[in-house]
Amino acid sequence: MNMEKYDYIIAGAGCAGRSLAVHLMPYLVATGKSLLMIDEDWQEHKGKTWCFWETQPGIFESIVFKKWTKLFFSGFSGKKELDIHPYTYKMIRSVDFYDYTSSVIENSSSVTIVTGKIEQTYSSGQYAYVLLNGRTYAADYVFNSIPAPVKKEDEKYQYFLQHFKGWIIQTDEDIFHPAAATLMDFNTFQKMGTSFFYVLPLSSNKAMVEYTVFSTALLQESEYQLALNKYIRGNLGCKKFDILEEENGVIPMSDHPLPKGTGRIINIGTAGGFTKPSTGYTFRFIQKHCVAMVAQLSNGGHPLVNNSFPRRFAYYDGTLLRLLRHNNIAGKEIFSILFEKSQPHQLLKFLDNETSILQEWNIFKVLPKKKFLKALIERMIAVNWHIS
Ligand SMILES: Cc1cc2nc3c(=O)[nH]c(=O)nc-3n(C[C@H](O)[C@H](O)[C@H](O)COP(=O)(O)OP(=O)(O)OC[C@H]3O[C@@H](n4cnc5c(N)ncnc54)[C@H](O)[C@@H]3O)c2cc1C
């Protein structure tokens, strides 16, 4: 059989695959183990920016493009400054991430890179296998970031899309405060779904302005453009600006459980369910998952992480999506209550799935309890007894 054997294979070298390779590097060097990385397009970084919050410098601190210590939220009660200490909100550009990770990976004698479209991955006996271009690659473990098609179960789960268009604009006048970003500004129509703007100043006259919608269908291109133009001119008061760059994206927001892996295949990134269903944030969950997998490997164990975070967070996410789906309460109202009535740093900790039950109670007590409880029970019934 035409077969090559490695200790590990990373199938799909995007955010999760490359993050894992960087986290694995010291372990590979120390143990002499080999890693094969496969992607259909090794260098294409797809013009994204990744934002996240953390309290400490992370493994990619050297490529953080911009940081903000002040965040603003605008909902029902106007504009509110959020005290996020000890968190810092950070942005990494995918171009820097791909350059940095490529240099780490390509300079390592432990790693082999193959470009090609993976046709199949499977686990059998003591190895996992990847098929591409008529060749078979075997490894002790395959870390897979290629999402498998999901067979929707509408009666049980919710399937939203978080879709957005962002422009990096340059303005003639200095209208931005470079140290303060706007996490959510709900001053826009909500008829398309939960809709808000995100403003990340890069300097006093340059910012990323993004229009984001949570709904089940995408908008027409002209609708995103119209909303952005209206917001920049009307809300930001900027009559003249140049668009320097554009970001478009769609992130699945669903409570449909995704398999963590099978046998010797471990699913990572969005494919492994590391996109938070209620927010779309993924970057920090990927990093935490990588740390946990490498720790288990270093201890001689199987890299499948059973409990990346307590299961109750999946119930919270599912409940929020169910409330949005049945229009029981609008997204603007939920996020306004949360950001206006809770302590912002506790809320960020909660959205990172890291709070204790007591801290969660302090957050939940400000929410319309009857509506949340009803949605929680209805979802439990739908998931367990298929009655929607
Ligand atoms: C525009 C955009 C902006 C985002 N911004 C944020 C953010 O600010 N903060 C945040 O936390 N999250 C963000 N996300 C969500 C999430 O962090 C990203 O989607 C992230 O890239 C997910 O990483 P991944 O490795 O799972 O998937 P990807 O990065 O998409 O990597 C999957 C890789 O698999 C490869 N591949 C697919 N099929 C095959 C095949 N058959 N054979 C070989 N290779 C294959 C692809 O080429 C790709 O390189 C954003 C998402 C998008 C789309």
Image: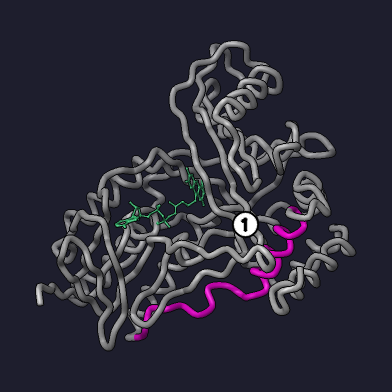
Q: Amino acid at mark 1?
A: Tyr
Query: What residue is shown at x 24% (from left), y 54% (from top)?
Result: 104
| Front-most of residues 276 and 193 | 193
Query: What residue is shown at x 13% (from left), y 63% (from top)?
Result: 109
Residue 228 in the image: state x and y as whole percent.
61, 26
Query: What residue is shown at x 66% (from left), y 60% (from top)?
Result: 158
Residue 376 in the image: state x and y as whole percent.
78, 69
> Which residue corresponds to mark 1?
159
Query: What residue is shown at x 44% (from left), y 61% (from top)?
Result: 269
Residue at disc 1, secondary structure? strand
Q: Quadrant of the C terminus?
A: bottom right
Q: Is residue 382 above or below residue 275?
A: below
Residue 211 in the image: state x and y as whole percent.
61, 34
Query: Which of the 4 image quadrants contains residue 7?
Result: bottom left
Q: Residue furthest right?
A: 370
| Front-most of residues 219 and 106 | 219
Q: How would you rate the neighbour count of disc 1 (Cα within 10 Å): few for under 14, some for 14-19, many for 20 or more?
A: some
Instruction: Point out the stretch of residues depicted in magenta.
Output: 301-324
Q: Is residue 282 above or below residue 302?
A: above
Query: Which of the 4 image quadrants contains residue 147?
Result: bottom left
